[in-house]
Each structure stands twice: as C-alpha cells, then as structure tokens.
Image (tube, rainbow, N blue to C red):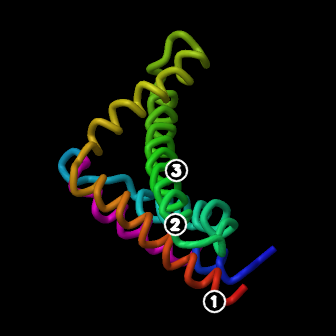
C-alpha cells in the first residue's frame, strides 16, 4: 500500500542511487561504464527504497540507522550482481563457456568478486554507508510526519 514513507524512500534512494552510480564511473577501466549503469543502479535503489526502507518507515530514528545500512548493502550487492550478470551474458554470447550453463552461472559469482574488488574504494564505501543512513533518516521523517 502506498504511503508517504514508501514514496519518500523511493524518491530519495533513487536519487541517491543515481549519485552513487555517477560516483563509481571513474572506477571502471578507462572510466568507461556501460550505458545502462546509471539507470539500472538508480532503478535498483528506487525499488530498495520503496520495498525495504519505505515499508519500515515510522518506527523511529534509531532503527532507521540499521535500515539505512541494510539498504546501502542491498544496493551495493544488487548493483554488483547486475553488472556481473551483464558481463556473463556478454561472455555467453561470445561462446566463452565450454562447460554449459553451470559454468556461466558460476562465472557470475566470480565476476561479482572481481567487480567488488574494483569498487573497493574508501570514499565510495563511506558515501554508500553514510548516505544510506541519511536517506533512511529522511524517509523516517516523512514516514512519521505523513503516516
């Protein structure tokens, strides 16, 4: 059911995801990110803001800290999974997997490790965690103010 907390969470986290995606572009090789990177990360963040943070808005600012950290971790995991899955599809279309489907599925997780190491940047991680908490607090404010 739509509430002000869910709407605020979706909007705030969607904008935050757009900012994070833009912040992570220089970390790609030759600063060349895929064309879908900005909209996909902001879409993932929008959904996480609606489903995770917005649904829990209105319970207080202390629980919002944990919710913000959870949302930040979920955004990071889903974004790394999306880029890894895309890379697996590119490799599969180039016939790089001789072992079949299982080799491709396992390679998604190997790609996730590679991309996670590539994105292991202190300012990006700090922005992800602190920004997640701030976005959760803003969502909490709207969840309490407009129930």
What's the magenta region?
Answer: 10-28
Quadrant placement of the C terminus: bottom right
- Residue 48 position, x and y percent, is 59, 60
SS at circle 2? helix
Establish if 128 lies above or below 105. below
The residue sitting at 69% across, 67% down in the picture is 55
Which label is found at residue 79?
A: none
Q: Secondary structure at mark 1?
A: helix
User: Which dot, 3 or 1, sits closer to the camera?
Assistant: 1
Left or right: 29 as drawn, with respect to 85: left
Residue most toward the right? 1
Residue at the image position 43 percent from the left and 64 percent from the top: 132
Labels 1 and 2: the sequence-earlier one: 2
- Secondary structure beneath dot 3 equals helix
> Which residue has dot 1 on it?
145
Does the magenta segment cover residue 146? no
Q: Which residue is mark 3?
A: 74
Q: How many marks?
A: 3
Residue at the outermost top position: 99
Q: Position of residue 73 (x, y in %)?
A: 46, 49
Q: Which residue is mark 2?
A: 62
């Amino acid at each position: 059911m739509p509430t002000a907390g869910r709407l605020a969470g979706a909007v705030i986290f969607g904008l935050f995801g757009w900012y994070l995606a833009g912040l992570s572009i220089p970390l790609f090789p030759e600063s060349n990110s895929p064309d879908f990177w900005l909209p996909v990360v902001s879409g993932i963040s929008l959904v996480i803001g609606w489903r995770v943070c917005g649904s829990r808005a209105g319970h207080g600012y202390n629980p919002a800290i944990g919710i913000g950290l959870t949302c930040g971790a979920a955004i990071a995991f889903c974004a790394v999974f999306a880029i890894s899955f895309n890379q697996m599809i590119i490799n599969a279309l180039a016939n790089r997997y001789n072992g079949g489907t299982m080799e491709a599925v396992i390679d998604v997780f190997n790609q996730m490790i590679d991309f996670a190491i590539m994105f292991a940047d202190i300012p990006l991680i700090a922005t992800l965690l602190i920004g997640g908490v701030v976005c959760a607090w803003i969502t909490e404010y709207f969840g309490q103010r407009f129930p």
